[in-house]
Amino acid sequence: MTMRSRTRTLFTPRLPLVSALALTLLATSCASEPEVPEPVAAAVERGSTQSGALLIEDAWMPEPANPEVGVVYLAVTNTAATADAVTGVHTSASPDADLCNTETTESGAGAMRVVDEIPVPAGGTTTFVDGGYHVMVNDIPEPLAVGDAVTVTLTFASGSEAEVEVPVQEMTGPAPDHSGHDDPHGHH
Ligand SMILES: [Cu+2]
């Protein structure tokens, strides 16, 4: 079919509307095809789940450098009108998991401390991150590698429970560097 004849069919009144639409869609999808970058797809492969008013997102475990100890990072959003708190954690990765916080000491060093609860304000999000709250997984019996997945179950003060599938991924993203964060304690 020549270019000329194809152009002419578009203007033929007998051409069904469906065909015209199909041509338009085809043109659109062809045009956008080269704009889908693969790295973006890989970056969004993190765990998420919803349980009532609670939303868990961006759940992942960096591949443990020490095979016996891992951490889980995620974000908890509480859409309820009342404050809640994470009060417990279980994981398929190990029978021994804790809620933990990295606190900055007066000398500026980070020290981890097991905590009883992690507050999630009403209408707010608490992010588990390097240098802050996280799930600590101890005594991992079977080494975990990139591509593995574990389940993590968080229990809340409200009685809610949320189970999320957590992929083990390469340690990426922000390096363990706290210089970019607000430091309410000043320099000393
Ligand atoms: Cu810890």
Image: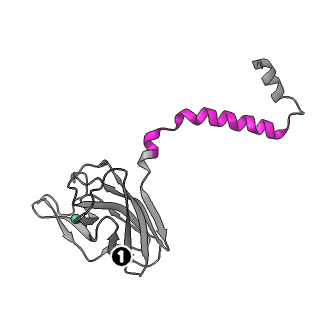
Q: What percent of the width, then of the height, locates residue 180?
A: 25, 51
Pick the residue in front: 80 or 128: 128
Image coords of residue 127 (percent x, y): 34, 63
Ligand 1 visible in quadrant: bottom left
Most foreground residue, 107 or 150: 150
Quadrant (top left, top right, bottom left, bottom right) of the C terminus: bottom left
Can you give x and y, in whole percent of width and height, for residue 152 in the image? 37, 67
Q: Which color scheme does this rendered protein use?
A: one colour
Characterize the magenta stretch by its predominant secondary structure.
helix
Residue at 48% in and 73% down: 53
Check if residue 4 falls in the magenta segment.
no
Which quadrant is home to the N terminus? top right
SS of the residue at dot 1? strand
Residue in view at x 23 percent, y 66 percent: 138
As drawn, is 114 to the left or to the right of 129? left
Q: Residue furthest right?
A: 14
Characterize the local packing of mark 1: few (<14), some (14-19) or many (20 or more) Cα atoms within 10 angstroms.
many
Q: Quadrant of residue 183?
A: bottom left
Q: Nearer the viewer, residue 37 or 153?
A: 153
Q: Is residue 154 left or right of residue 175?
A: right
Q: Is residue 39 magenta?
A: yes
Q: Percent x, y for residue 60?
A: 36, 57
Q: How many marks?
A: 1
Q: From the image, tell me which residue sits under label 1.
A: 85
Magenta-highlighted residues = 16-41
Which kind of residue does numbered mark 1 sit on? Ala
Residue 56 in the image: above or below residue 12: below
In the figure, residue 135 lies in which quadrant? bottom left
The picture quadrant where one finds residue 74 is bottom left
Say left or right for 23 vs 126: right
Indicate yes or no: mark 1 CB to ligand 1 under 8 Å: no
